[in-house]
Amino acid sequence: QVQLVESGGGLVQAGGSLRLVCVYSGSIFNINAVGWYRQAPGKQRDLVASLTSGLITHYPDSVKGRFTNSRDNAKNTVYLQMNNLKPEDTTVYYCNIDVRSRWGTITRYWGQGTQVTVSS
């Protein structure tokens, strides 16, 4: 069983910064990719950042240049550094890891979500 525990959300003023932390644990053969999504009430979950095992990153234009996704393998931790936050960044953020089994199948696991609120 794989578990992800998120922390680091909170309230910040526009222009401020937050760092989200996601610690994963469990039976993991290999990680194919890690990332972050966000989801507003009643809306779909949108990609915020992704980082493949080959260190290829992807960010949508809405966060490019402001958010940075990173990973510390020794600590089993994924980070999302968010700078120059805007009120429209307010929502719940979810981390994910895509785990590859020894048979090649990939399973996505999710964190519990953490609220980020940016005041204007």
Image: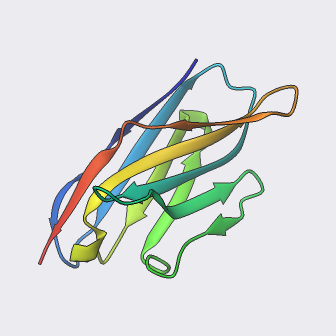
Residue 80 in percent (x, y) is at 44, 57
Query: Which residue is most to the front?
Result: 42
User: Is any atom of residue 8 visible in this view?
Assistant: no
Query: Which residue is most to the right?
Result: 103
Q: Is residue 109 left or right of residue 4?
A: right
Q: Is residue 9 left or right of residue 96?
A: left
Rendered position, 77 above or below 103: below
Residue plotted at (80% across, 33% down): 105
In terms of depth relative to the viewer, which is nearer, 96 or 29? Answer: 96
Residue 89 in percent (x, y) is at 30, 70
Residue plotted at (65% across, 66% down): 57
Residue plotted at (58% across, 17% down): 1
In terms of depth relative to the viewer, which is nearer, 46 or 32? Answer: 46
Residue plotted at (11% across, 78% down): 120
Q: How is the image coloured?
A: rainbow
Locate residue 39: give its quadrant: bottom left
Residue 63 in percent (x, y) is at 44, 76
User: Is any atom of residue 102 visible in this view?
Assistant: yes
Residue 10 in percent (x, y) is at 19, 53
Numbered marks: total? 0
Rendered position, 61 above or below 70: below
Locate residue 100: give its quadrant: top right
In terms of depth relative to the viewer, which is nearer, 65 or 41? Answer: 41
